[in-house]
């Protein structure tokens, strides 16, 4: 049977526009010979619609578009994800899939299934809106070109993860919808998804789905949306496997695609692995593509053409600029270098070189005079006080103000440039370098930042990011001779501690680092820094999640608290 | 039977300190004659512990403290809320209550019950951490001074809300733990809570609990924590009712209290109503107390002594200063007035008068010179461009930078002063007047701000908040002759639209305002402003929730989206 997979990029809440896309995709897939077409989870809304689901007016709009969509459906069925009313007790909606067929019948849909497992961890809040589907998924007969109808079952995203464990002995869920299907029940299992990216997740998905196909002895067709929606990037990476678990179709990641899979074909294809490997350029490229798409979509979906970036001469802003140019084109990226009295000439030169290499416009706005004016104005109050972090922050905030002024005057979006290591330990200034509409690399450890920079230069076969930017010791240059390592352990040690604490959720006593770097005392210090910086992160701009545990909606931490 | 109710103020995550408090409260209650003592939901952690619950190290610490607590328990039982391991499939924890009794036995606890209904709406995320308790609550025999033992059942917070409806015909939950208890099953139902305040919620709780008591023909003892924890304030307001639903004990709201209720006594007492009524000074006082406690606890629990507030001469900053003085004492509040070239002398005078009335220190830091220096610095780039909102925002951000500089230099926390109406329509500057650690009145509509100001002056029997501040038309004073009503409808109309959209979740076509104020067109414009300002609110500081729907964790909205 030929199944059309609609891997589309939706604008959340754009019910009319998204439905138009689905209709166009459906028609194209049918023209390409599809006997069944599949769109992704909550496709009319775009995933995740968040509290829009609490508005009757939004749900009414979905109903109108669903009806319009149905009117476009001919003999070939369409499976699409919708928010479906729950007419019983409990949350007012199901996260459902509906099989639309017209076929001369009056029935608007021949079948529905409701998502049974609702992810409510990390960035997911599905129990906030949905009731769990109570019934095992139905099995449908779909007419195809062969003699026998195709037996098809539908599951929604998390439904296939019920076998996963939350620790060594227990499952994440009390049910497992996959286990409720028996070997031989269906020819093809359709899974519709709104599955956000993290680096390496593609391989995890493929291994899971491949195992399910072998267990149930059926084809599995996995359809996912693509695109950046706020802090989430969806990589698409839709694919299908045969009953041996072999890949028989695979869409390109990070692009829209209408892909037809013939489940009867014996041809296999390569699955586009995204294995998380800092040594492998193909793997790094995958991560880079996620950052590019996330940036592109946040800027464009918010109606901006251009962005402005403060270039410090350091590696974080250089990487951010490269991503922006890749996402938006060099004409749409403006760099501003804002030297302070403590900036080295080298840093300004590095920024100018970067801009030249990228072909972007750069302007220099020295902040010395404004900084001195702050000093004059605050003199009566600060009389007799030592210089300290206050004066460092004033400089950072002058830069923030200038970037925002350019943003206001010209309508450019400010991209901020902080990395995950800095944001973890609070090595950043609220309203200063943290200012901006989107924090492009806020989920990249400093060690990853270096690898991404290396990757860019290797791809470009030149030092697009200047050699000096890569090789000089990182510094905020907010006081004379400042270096990051003055107050922090080396970045590889720091990142190791942070990964264990934030991503692996280990406590002080469980975190291991080599004794030569200070042992438990350093661990304690770093974790205290992380906890003390929570008040900054609660005010940070959205950034692109590429790890299993990013700051933002995936990590919810009390501020007025005693931390362990 | 005499039951001791521990209405305590916990620091989230301070397992040792909170346990100390519970032990001291237990001993005091026993000394006062209690035959059973009750602490609140998740009392060892303090509610809500958020993602601390994902850390094994935090759960281990709870175990240690629970054991220490148990060792202090004598013959008199203690009911206390804990995060309890789930040894089956599903989320790794239950939100449980445990009845600790020592009594010479080896059993550490004689009974437990697991919360069955997990709130996962508004600010609540309980499905993120907990599995629903599967079993109807147990009934325990508690020895008392009478001949027969007391039959007691325990429910946890949301468990008693299962009868509530999510619309006219459906219940919020598929189960109702209260209905699983039958009339006559128990003498006393104990409900332990971590129930955050909103204005008027006390009355809602009382009516619900009173009805349950009548239905089950039993006493109900409702124990709640108090205190500000980040964006939430807990009002306590612990109480007990007899089988007629009459109040037989009531703790004062917003203060710690060890209260003994004798369920056999025939004496009834008044429940401290908090009815939401802008005309009633007692009702307004209740709201004011919530703001005072929220501010006090956020400042103190984060280790700050003093706060700094930018005083504009307007009513928002005046109200914020009054709250701060009430919460922290006049010695701990610093006002800064930062006149710009567009500030009226009247505004500066009003700030000075306010400071004098409150007895707080105030310093004047004119921003004219810094503002002019920004103009000079940006001249080459802004050449030929009209003055616009850019220059207004620069002024606001200079003030933000100055406040943060004072904060950094002296270790004061900045309180920001924006109200809910402004924050709704984006009539505020990111990193400018939005800058600060805590947004005290961010959940107060402008119309409420006026009522709170009136209340303060009435209580003080003088114009603490200057008459001129109250009577002059609101203005940001960021350009000549600017008034809020230049670009917004009158505040009563604006607030009416915003309440319907944000709190009642109505769409454009459902929102009604008088035709003379512009009808649907004005509604459309206001809602568009709300949606366009989401990117600002995502970066706003935490504020105190006092309404059923505040910005912050209770309202989750996509930014890159098409809004209806």
Image: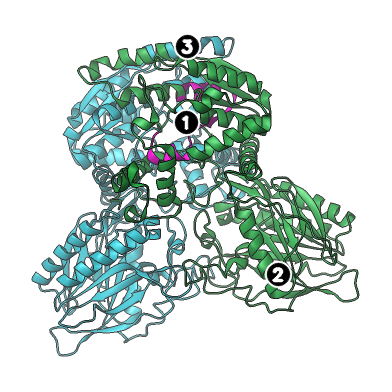
Chain colours: A green, B cyan
Closer to us: A215 or B219: A215
Label 1 environment density (alpha carbons within 10 Å; few <14, some 14–19, many ≥20): many
Q: Is residue A114 left or right of residue B267?
A: right
What residue is at 16 percent from the left and 65 percent from the top?
B23
- Dot 3 falls on a residue whose secondary structure is helix
- Dot 1 falls on a residue whose secondary structure is loop
What label does residue A213 carry, if any? 2
Residues flagged by tags 1 and 2 on a common chain: yes
Residues flagged by tags 3 and 1 on a common chain: no
What residue is at 34 percent from the left and 37 percent from the top?
B437
Label 2 environment density (alpha carbons within 10 Å; few <14, some 14–19, many ≥20): many
Q: Is residue B20 left or right of residue B543?
A: left
Q: Is residue A21 above or below residue A206?
A: above
What residue is at 14 percent from the left and 79 percent from the top?
B75
Separation (CA) of disc 1 from disc 2: 47 Å
Closer to us: B333 or A313: A313
- Dot 2 falls on a residue whose secondary structure is helix
What label does residue B377 carry, if any? 3
In the rendered image, the quadrant that contains the N terminus of chain B is bottom left
Label 3 environment density (alpha carbons within 10 Å; few <14, some 14–19, many ≥20): some
Closer to us: A254 or B512: A254
Residue A90 at x, y percent in the picture: 52, 69
Separation (CA) of disc 3 from disc 2: 64 Å
Kindly indicate the quadrant of the structure image that contains residue B513. Answer: top right
């Amino acid at each position: 049977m030929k199944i059309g997979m609609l891997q589309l990029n939706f604008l959340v809440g754009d019910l009319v526009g998204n439905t138009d896309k689905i209709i166009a995709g459906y028609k194209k897939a049918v023209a390409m010979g599809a006997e069944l077409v599949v769109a992704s989870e909550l496709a009319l809304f775009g995933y995740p619609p968040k509290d829009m689901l609490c508005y009757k007016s939004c749900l009414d709009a979905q109903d109108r578009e669903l009806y319009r969509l149905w009117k476009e459906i001919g003999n070939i069925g369409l499976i699409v994800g919708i928010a479906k009313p729950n007419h019983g007790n409990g949350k007012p909606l199901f996260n459902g899939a509906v099989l639309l067929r017209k076929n001369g019948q009056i029935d608007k849909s021949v079948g529905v299934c409701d998502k049974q497992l609702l992810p409510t961890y990390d960035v997911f809040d599905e129990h906030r809106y949905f009731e769990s589907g109570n019934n095992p998924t139905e099995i449908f007969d779909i007419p195809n070109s062969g003699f026998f109808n195709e037996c098809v079952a539908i599951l929604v995203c998390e439904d296939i993860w019920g076998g996963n464990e939350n620790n060594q002995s227990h499952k994440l869920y009390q049910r497992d919808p996959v286990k409720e299907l028996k070997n031989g029940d269906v020819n093809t299992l359709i899974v519709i998804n709104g599955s956000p990216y993290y680096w390496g997740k593609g391989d995890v998905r493929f291994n899971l789905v491949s195992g399910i196909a072998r267990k149930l002895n059926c084809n599995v067709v996995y359809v996912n949306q693509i695109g950046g929606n706020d802090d989430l990037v969806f990589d698409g990476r839709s694919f299908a496997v045969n009953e041996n678990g072999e890949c028989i179709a695979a869409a390109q990641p990070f692009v829209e695609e209408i892909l037809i899979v013939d489940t009867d074909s014996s041809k296999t294809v390569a699955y586009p692995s995204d294995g998380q490997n800092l040594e492998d350029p193909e793997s790094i490229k995958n991560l880079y593509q996620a950052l590019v798409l996330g940036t592109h979509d946040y800027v464009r979906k918010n109606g901006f053409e251009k962005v402005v970036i403060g270039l410090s001469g350091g590696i974080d802003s250089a990487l951010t600029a490269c991503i922006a140019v890749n996402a938006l084109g060099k004409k749409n990226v403006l760099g501003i270098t804002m030297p302070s009295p403590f900036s080295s000439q080298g840093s300004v030169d590095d920024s100018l070189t970067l801009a030249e290499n990228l072909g972007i416009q750069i302007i220099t706005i020295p902040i010395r005079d404004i900084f001195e004016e702050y000093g004059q104005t605050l003199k009566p109050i600060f009389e007799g006080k030592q210089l300290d972090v206050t004066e460092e922050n004033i400089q950072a905030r002058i830069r923030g103000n200038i970037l925002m002024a350019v943003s206001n005057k010209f309508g450019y979006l400010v991209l901020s440039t902080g990395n995950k290591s800095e944001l973890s330990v609070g090595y950043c200034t609220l309203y200063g370098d943290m200012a901006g509409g989107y924090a492009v690399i806020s989920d990249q450890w400093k060690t990853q930042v270096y690898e991404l920079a290396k990757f860019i230069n290797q791809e470009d076969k030149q030092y697009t990011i200047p050699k000096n930017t890569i090789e000089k010791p990182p510094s905020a240059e907010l006081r004379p001779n400042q270096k990051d390592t003055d107050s922090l352990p080396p970045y590889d040690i720091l990142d190791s501690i942070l990964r264990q604490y934030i991503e692996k959720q280990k406590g002080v006593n469980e975190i291991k680092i080599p004794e030569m770097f200070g042992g438990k005392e350093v661990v304690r210090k770093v974790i205290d820094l992380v906890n003390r910086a929570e008040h900054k992160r609660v005010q940070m701009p959205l950034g692109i999640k590429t790890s299993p545990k990013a700051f933002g909606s995936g990590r919810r931490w009390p501020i007025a608290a005693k931390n362990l």
